[in-house]
Amino acid sequence: MLLASAASGRAGKGRRYFFVANLVVCSFITPDFVSTIFLVVPVQVLLEACIWISAYWERQKKRELAAAALAAQQPDGGSAVG
């Protein structure tokens, strides 16, 4: 989870490099251009999906931490027992 969270922050910088590396690796696996594209596209889509999911999880975690910090700062809830 820590790796995914770190990846979402730096993913924008490395997307171009990953695309080129992905293209090179897939071109060695398949000599045909069409087959290479059919390999590159799903891997890129999965990469983007993972980045979006990681960013979503990171936002959710920040919201939970902020809510917990806010709840810790407030008094017991203000309800009177009577």
Image (cartoon, rainbow, N blue to C red):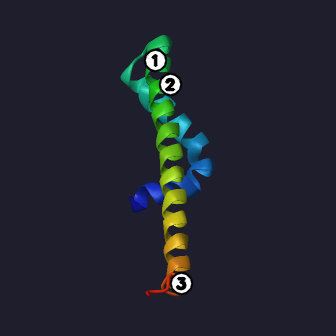
- Place of residue 9 in the rendered image (x, y in percent of width and height, measured from the top left): 57, 57
Q: Quadrant of the C terminus?
A: bottom left
**What crowding class fits label 3: few (fewer than 14 Cα within 10 Å), some (14-19), or many (20 or more)?**
few
* CA gap, disc 3 and disc 2: 56 Å
Query: Secondary structure beneath disc 3?
Result: loop
* CA gap, disc 2 and disc 1: 6 Å
Q: Please give the label number shown on residue 67.
A: none
Amino acid residing under circle 3 = Gly
Q: Quadrant of the N terminus?
A: bottom left
- Place of residue 56 in the rendered image (x, y in percent of width and height, measured from the top left): 52, 51
Mark 1 touches mark 3? (CB < 8 Å): no
Furthest residue to the front? 82
Q: Which residue: 48% across, 85% down?
A: 76
Vertical order, 73 against 39 (above or below): below
Q: Which residue: 46% across, 17% down?
A: 38
What count of labels does the image hold? 3
Q: Which residue: 50% across, 29% down?
A: 23
Which numbered disc flags the more N-terminal residue, 3 or 2?
Answer: 2
Residue receiving disc 1: 38
Q: Which residue: 58% across, 43% down?
A: 15
Residue receiving disc 3: 78
- Place of residue 43 in the rendered image (x, y in percent of width and height, measured from the top left): 45, 31
Mark 2 touches mark 1? (CB < 8 Å): yes
- Place of residue 48 in the rendered image (x, y in percent of width and height, measured from the top left): 53, 38
Residue receiving disc 2: 41
Vertical order, 46 against 2 (above or below): above
Q: Quadrant of residue 28?
A: top left
